[in-house]
Amino acid sequence: MAKALLGYVGGPDPRMLSEMRRLQQRVLDLENELIKLQAENDALAAVADEHSLLNSIDLDQREPALT
């Protein structure tokens, strides 16, 4: 019964180990890409805040609304 649950006696399947290594590397690659994209997004957001139209409006120089 134990053999049926484990598959066979002889150690881990080399194909499964290879696939696991490939998936672990893929996860690392995706995590690095995420970090890079988050840094790029933060930089773009900082630039966008500096050039925002709302920041260029001088609230003391507003014109009255037409009535």
Image: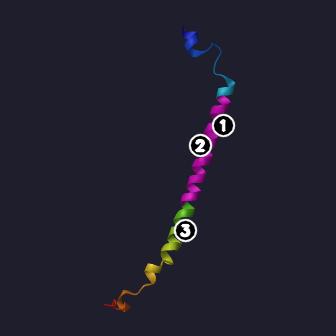
Instruction: Locate residue 34, reporting x and y percent.
Output: 56, 53
Residues at discs 3 and 2 in contact (Cβ within 8 Å): no
Q: In terms of secondary structure, where does tag 3 sit? A: helix
Few, some or many C-alpha atoms within 10 Å of disc 2 (few <14, some 14-19, many ≥20)? few
Give the residue drawn at x 42%, y 85%. 57
Few, some or many C-alpha atoms within 10 Å of disc 3 (few <14, some 14-19, many ≥20)? few
Please report the bounds of the magenta region as a residue range: 17-38
Amino acid, disc 2: Val
Give the residue drawn at x 38%, y 92%. 61
Label disc, if present, on residue 27 of the rendered structure: 2
Residue topped by disc 3: 44
Dot 2 or dot 1, earlier in sequence:
1
**In the image, residue 37 above or below residue 49:** above
Dot 3 or dot 1, earlier in sequence:
1
Give the residue drawn at x 45%, y 84%. 56
Q: How is the image coloured?
A: rainbow
